[in-house]
Amino acid sequence: AHLERIAVVDGAVNAFLDVDADRALADADAADAARRDGTATSELTGVPVAVKDLFVTRGQVTTAASRILEGWVPPYDATAVTNLRGAHLPILGKTNLDEFAMGGSTEHSAFGRTANPWDLGRIPGGSSGGSAAAVGAYEAPLALGTDTGGSIRQPAAVTGTVGVKPTYGTVSRFGVIAMASSLDTPGPMARTVLDTALLHDVIASYDPLDSTSLTDAPRGMAAVVRAAQQGRDLTGTRVGVIAELDGGHAYQAGVMDSFHAALALLEEAGASIETVSLPNLEYALDAYYLIMPAEVSSNLARYDGMRYGLRVEPTEGPVTAETVMAATRGAGFGDEAKRRIILGTHVLSAGYYDAYYGSAQKVRTLVQRDLNAAFADFDVLVSPTSPVTAYRFGEKDDPMAMYALDVTTIPANLAGIPGMSLPSGLSDDALPVGFQILAPQRADDRLYRVGAVLEA
Ligand code: GLN
């Protein structure tokens, strides 16, 4: 049914870069067999999933939406993909993204943009926009995304779906093409909080192949959701509204109305609601846009025209390792990737390192301290997931305008804490609004508990 749906709507949505129907159907048969012989390990056995094309998949082209990896067939699976296969979740295909996950709109893919199923003239968010659109357009019930600065939560918000960035280290980064390693967080996307929790439980695992993998990765989220759905009671839960993210000139009025209506629902369910100020959040966006490109410039150095994908030889002059590298990178990377590589090498260069990268790391610590202090008084912190609803293609052509919208999601990545976005209804422009919940490290269960009650 999902393959048929893809055949009908994906011409317009363009959520998928690659669909392998034969393999998906074979996986589905294997899942049936596992159910029959009692070896099914998950309730999701047999339920198909779409995978962001940043996860490497053995035998299936993986590009990170970049020309530099066009046609590359990985010889191995990412650990999260291994976990999907182990539980027999058929993989429908690979979804579109901003090149190397750099962007917030999926307009920066080398292979064309993805459309928002709510309005095909608008962005589906990004960078996991293909995954969010696939779920929102009922092409897939589940999807994998990655969140380095909001790339699961923000596309979930603007497509009316649910997305979770787990605690850093919960889902292995092994085989996830690296953007900014200290921030990269793979996670689940779906249409309900329970589905998201079920997928979380499949992909979360300790992985010795990822040096930052947690040995006690938070799991058991589906049970938390079911218990919360029974009780629907948040008595005693202290919800902190982040003052710095509670409106302002950048926020659409319809987004704020939806956000405040959701707060009233939490209060009705018994939660206490108070405002809390995190003064250093003011600098979080700036710190992210120094630390992230620094790590990007280092991670993308491996695309040198020798080891993977594209290789371009210079049209004139000598053919040396250096000139091949320059020609390949010049032709293979898009503008946004080049912009961040240049920015990153600049902030890491001698004479600027302390002023930019060093200062940004100090700000990162201050943001972490602000969050820790707030979590001493509150169980969860909340904000709108994005200041705006889905905008029209081309509306944020100025990169700074796009970056500015990440202000709400970035703190969680700087601090490694878990965050969820779930729908809180429609804005006055009839487009979906996302409600963001944040919890302390390893307390992912709180997102699912509060999210389950709000959803009900
Ligand atoms: N929008 C952010 C950026 O452009 C986040 C990207 C991400 O989370 N992968 O960097």
Image (cartoon, grey):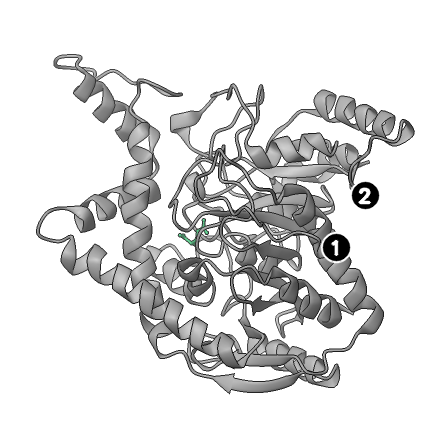
Q: Nearer the viewer, residue 216 or 102?
A: 216
Residue 94 seen from this side: no
Residue 452 x %, y %: 73, 66
Q: For the residues marked 2 and 1, what is the alpha-carbon distance in whole angstroms? A: 10 Å
Residue at image coords 86%, 28%: 32
Quick one: 268 or 61, which is closer to the camera? 268
Helix, strand or loop at disc 1? helix
Up-down relation of residue 36 to residue 233 (above or below): above
Query: Number of labelled discs?
Result: 2
Note whether 184 is above or below 364 in the view shown. Answer: above
**Label 1 belongs to which residue?**
222
* Image: 5 above or below 387: above
Left or right side of 47 for 80:
left
Query: Which residue is drawn at the image coordinates 37% and 59% (left, top)?
Result: 403
Place of residue 104 in the rendered image (x, y in percent of width and height, measured from the top left): 46, 53
Q: Residue furthest right?
A: 36
Identified at 57% across, 22% down, the residue is 58
Q: Is residue 300 left or right of residue 37?
A: left
Q: For the residue marked with disc 2, what is the amino acid?
A: Glu
Relative to 120, is 195 on the left or the right? right
Q: Residues within 10 Å of mark 2 (few under 14, many from 20)?
A: few
Q: Position of residue 203 (x, y in %)?
A: 63, 42
For marks 2 and 1, the one nearer the N-term is 2
Label 2–label 1 contact, CB within 8 A? yes
Label 2 sits on residue: 43
Badge 2 element: loop
Which image quadrant: the C terminus? bottom right
Q: Residues within 10 Å of mark 1 (few under 14, many from 20)?
A: many
